[in-house]
Image (cartoon, helix red, strand yellow):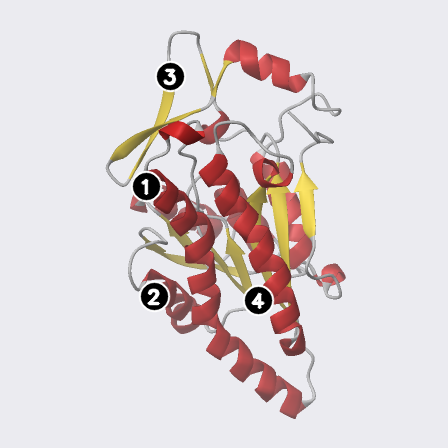
Amino acid sequence: MGKLDGKVALVTGAGRGIGRAVALKLASEGAAVFVNDLDAAPMDETIADIDAMGGRAIGLAGSVTAKGMADDLVNGAIDGLGGLDIIVNNAGYIWNTTVQNQTDEQIDAMLDVHAAAPIKILRAAAPHFRERHRAETADGTNVTRKVVNISSMAAVYGMPAAVSYAAGKGAAVGITTGMAREWGRYNITVNAVAFGYIDTRLTQRFEKGGQATIHVDGKDHKVGFQEGIQHDLLKLIPMARIGTPEDAANGVYLFCAPESDYITGQTLVVGGGLTTG
């Protein structure tokens, strides 16, 4: 018996890293998971791993910023898995430069994926959430639904050369507080998790003279830290280690579990004690 038995979760950006770990964690607690990722291959791997553990998962590949994708994701979960109880707005990436070098395209991309897309997904889910709440109230049942928006310590404490990324992740906090007040009457909690340095492809190590990149929407974006710089970052973390995707997923799970049914509008920092950098 899992604490999320009978629940249906939608997790965006769940093919790799934190999103994948979140999908697996929720599935391990009994949730059926609708998986989304920009790329089909890693999304299919996550689905296969959930199936292998005896869980239930389906998915839809594509960018959360694509026209109509929010409705497709929400309807896919409801039609394919029978409902929707948990939304984890995780999809995102970094495209960092100093402010004087930020292009309009770069600013728009960061705000679209980290701010506009989550709002559109919540907007798409609103009719279902309201209808289910009305039906449950009429039946005398009490069901709490959950939204977890993924933010970053870049938004909470600041980060150089990342103003658009930080703005998008800061918007996740604003979405959280606003929707917590708007949706409390529907018995929906809305919280955020702000991650510090988690070991993913966005924070990967590379040797001096090299440069790690990721490919998003036809562009290669620089990611990661030189090995020496990452070693210096460890000195700032009281727990003296980079967080794992599983550490990150556990933070998200706290807001999905029934023990958090009366916690809403909060931002939890998962960073091993790091408060600045």
> Of marks 1 and 4, which one's residue comes earlier in the chain?
4
Element type where label 3 sits in the image: loop
Q: Quadrant of residue 239?
A: top right
Q: Amino acid at mark 2?
A: Asp
Q: Residue furthest top?
A: 208
Do callouts 2 and 4 mark residues in contact (Cβ within 8 Å)? no
Viewer-nearest of discs 1 and 2: 1
> Is 76 drawn above or below residue 20 in the view shown?
below
Q: Quadrant of residue 110?
A: top left
> Of marks 1 and 2, which one's residue comes earlier in the chain?
2
Viewer-nearest of discs 3 and 1: 1
Instruction: Quickly name the residue at label 1.
Output: 104
Instruction: Quickly name the residue at label 2.
Output: 72
Instruction: Quickly name the residue at label 4.
Output: 7
Instruction: Quickly name the residue at label 3.
Output: 211
Element type where label 1 sits in the image: helix
- The percent position of residue 219, horizontal first and vertical second, equals 27, 34
Residue 125 versus residue 9: which sits nearer the camera? Answer: 125
- Residue 89 visible within the image: yes
Q: Quadrant of residue 106?
A: top left
> Of marks 3 and 4, which one's residue comes earlier in the chain?
4
The C terminus lies in quadrant: top right
Q: Residue at x 60, y 32 (%)?
A: 244
Q: Residue furthest front?
A: 100
Q: Alpha-carbon neighbours of circle 3 within 10 Å: few (<14), some, or many (≥20)?
A: some
